[in-house]
Amino acid sequence: MNGGAGSTPHILIVGGGGTGGALAHDLALRGARVTLVERGEFTSGTTGRHHGLLHSGARYAVNDQESAVECIEENMLLRRIAPGSFEENDGLFVGVTDEDMTYLPGFLAGCEETGIPTQVLQPDEALRLEPLLNPALKVAVRVPDATMDAMRMPLRFFATAKANGADLLSWVDVIDLELAAGVVSGARVRDLVTGRETRIGADLVVNATGPWSEQVARMAGVDVPIRPSPGVMLAVRGRLCNMVINRLHSSGDGDIVVPQRALSVIGTSSWVVEDPDDLGVPSDHVQRMIDEGSVLVPAVREAPYRSAWSAARPLIGSRDDADSGRELSRTFKTIDHAVDDGVEGFVTITGGKGTTLRGMAEVCADVVSRKLGIETACRTRDTVLLPHTAAFAA
C-alpha cells in the first residue's frame, strides 16, 4: 500500500548498492517508511567490486575538481561516522618519469584549490615509507587516501537503516514499474528465491541502480544519461605496500595499487559498454594492470596471481560523450523526473563513487523530502553507524 495523505510517506528504493543503502539510512532517520529491493546480495554489484580505496580526491584535483571536493569532504566525514572501517594509511602519488614531473605543479595547485592536504617527499623519504617502490622514482606526494573493505563499510549503512525500521529485501527483482497518468505508484517485483510475484506500492520510487539505472528508467518511459564504464582489477598475493600507491599523472590504466589485507589490488582500466551485465575480463587489460602496476611497485610483476574481475562505473554522460569513460566526470546527480520528463513519483540517483555514497544520499533525500513534505533535516553527517555485522541481525 502507499503512504497516502496524512500517513508516513513510503519510499521504495530500487537498488541495494552503497548508494541505496545510504539513502535508506538517511530517509529512515528522517522518519520515512522505507522499503529497499535488490535483485542479488546487498552490495554485490558495483559497490562490492571496487578496489577499496577511500579517495582523498587528489586523483581528480587537476581535471575534475567538483569530484575532488566531494571526495575530500566525504573522506573526512566517513572516518568520523564509521570508525574502525578504514586503514588510515594515507596514499602516495609517485612520479617516475620526466613527464610525471611536469604534472607535479598543477597537481599541487589543484590539491590546494580543492582543500586536499599534501606533503612533498624526496625519493629517499618515500622509500623509507615504502621500500618496494620503484627505486628510480623522482618524487612522491603524500595525501589522505585510506583503505576500506568495499562491502563491509557500505553494509554499516544497511545495518543502521535496518535498525531504524527500513525493510531491506535481497533477491527481489523489479519486473516493471507501475505507471499511470504520468505517475509512478510502485513496482511489480519477483522474489527470485520463491518465484512469487507481488506489488509494492509507494508514494515515490527511487532508482538507485547505478549502471543499471538506464534500464530501470525505461520502465517509466524516461531516459537517464548514463554510460556504464567497466574497469578491470587484479589482485596479487602479498601485501606489497602499506600505503595506497598512485601514479602522479592524469588518470590512466593500472595506476593505483591498494593494499587489502594480505593482497595487493591493482586497478583499473576503463571502457564503455551497452549492457552492464555483460562485462568480461579482457586478458589484455589484466596484462596492462601488471605492466603499469609494476612501474610503481616492480614486485607486482613477480607476485603470484590471486584473481581478476571487472565492475561497471555508473558515469554520467550520453552515449555520444565517451569512448573510454575517462572523459566523464566522477560526480553524481539526482534527477527528479517530474521536472525533467513530466513523470511524477520517480527519482533517479546516479554517478558518484564509493567514497561519496553518503553525500549522494543526502542530496537525493533532500529532493525526496521536498516532494513528500518531510520536514526533518538530514542527520547522517553526525550519526555514527552500527557495525556491518548488525546488517545480518534477525
Image (cartoon, rainbow, N blue to C red):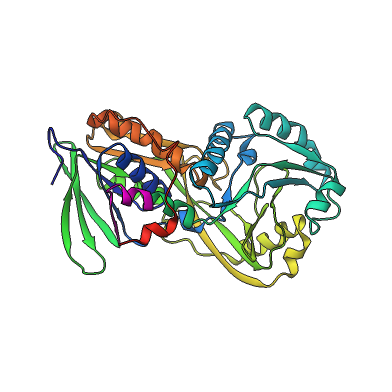
Q: Quadrant of residue 58?
A: top right
Q: Position of residue 23 (x, y in %)?
A: 36, 43
In-front residue for pair 378/135: 378
Q: Residue at x 50, y 37 (%)?
A: 331
Q: Is residue 193 above or below residue 53?
A: below
Label count reads 0
Find out whether residue 242 is within the magenta segment: no
Q: Quadrant of residue 259?
A: bottom right
Residue interval drawn in magenta: 159-170
Instruction: Note whether residue 45 is visible.
Output: no
Q: Residue at x 60, y 54 (%)?
A: 269
Q: Is residue 338 above or below residue 43?
A: above
Q: Position of residue 358 (x, y in %)?
A: 44, 41
Q: Position of residue 90 (x, y in %)?
A: 67, 46
Q: Position of residue 107 (x, y in %)?
A: 71, 35
Q: Residue at x 73, y 33 (%)?
A: 108
Which quadrant does the C terminus fall into?
A: bottom left
Left or right: residue 148 versus residue 190 is right
